[in-house]
Amino acid sequence: MKTITFKTDDLFFENFSKLAKSLHLSKSELIRKAIQEYEETLKKNMIKEKIKKASFKVRENIKKEIKELENTNLDGLLND
């Protein structure tokens, strides 16, 4: 297992230590869980963003198709 060291201010360390204790977790386990949760959140947000972009693309294509259908709606019905 590898070790990671980082610096923090006293207030952060105190709050973090209290949180770990209240959850009955070691500080290392709390950090691992927090990072895993953050990674999952990032992945979900990336998927949401891809879905959003795809949705807008589909909407634009549908708008174009509707416009084409509307243009052909009266074909042959108007007297020239």
Image (tube, rainbow, N blue to C red):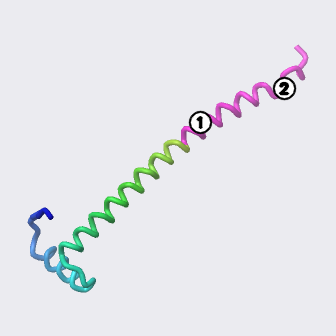
Q: What is the quadrant of the C terminus in the image? A: top right
Tell me: 3 left or right of 24.
Answer: left
Q: Quadrant of residue 28?
A: bottom left
Task: Choose between 59 and 43: the one closer to the eye.
Answer: 43
Tell me: 75 left or right of 18.
Answer: right
Magenta stretch: includes residue 38: no
Name the residue: 27% across, 83% down: 23
Q: Quadrant of residue 39?
A: bottom left
For the residues marked 2 and 1, what is the alpha-carbon distance in whole angstroms?
A: 23 Å
Q: What is the quadrant of the N terminus in the image? A: bottom left
Task: Choose between 65 and 2: the one closer to the eye.
Answer: 2
Q: Quadrant of residue 57?
A: top right
Q: Report which residue position mark 1 lands on.
A: 60
Residue 41 coordinates in the image, percent (x, y): 37, 60
Amino acid, disc 1: Glu
Magenta stretch: includes residue 61: yes
The label on residue 7 is none
Q: Main secondary structure of the magenta part?
A: helix
Residue 31 coordinates in the image, percent (x, y): 22, 69
So how many labels did they put on this image? Answer: 2
Name the residue: 23% across, 80% down: 25
Does 71 sit above or below residue 79? below
Secondary structure under tag 1 reads helix
Secondary structure under tag 2 reads loop
Name the residue: 44% across, 51% down: 47
Residue segment shown in magenta: 56-80
Q: Residues within 10 Å of mark 1 (few under 14, many from 20)?
A: few
The label on residue 74 is 2
Q: Residues within 10 Å of mark 2 (few under 14, many from 20)?
A: few
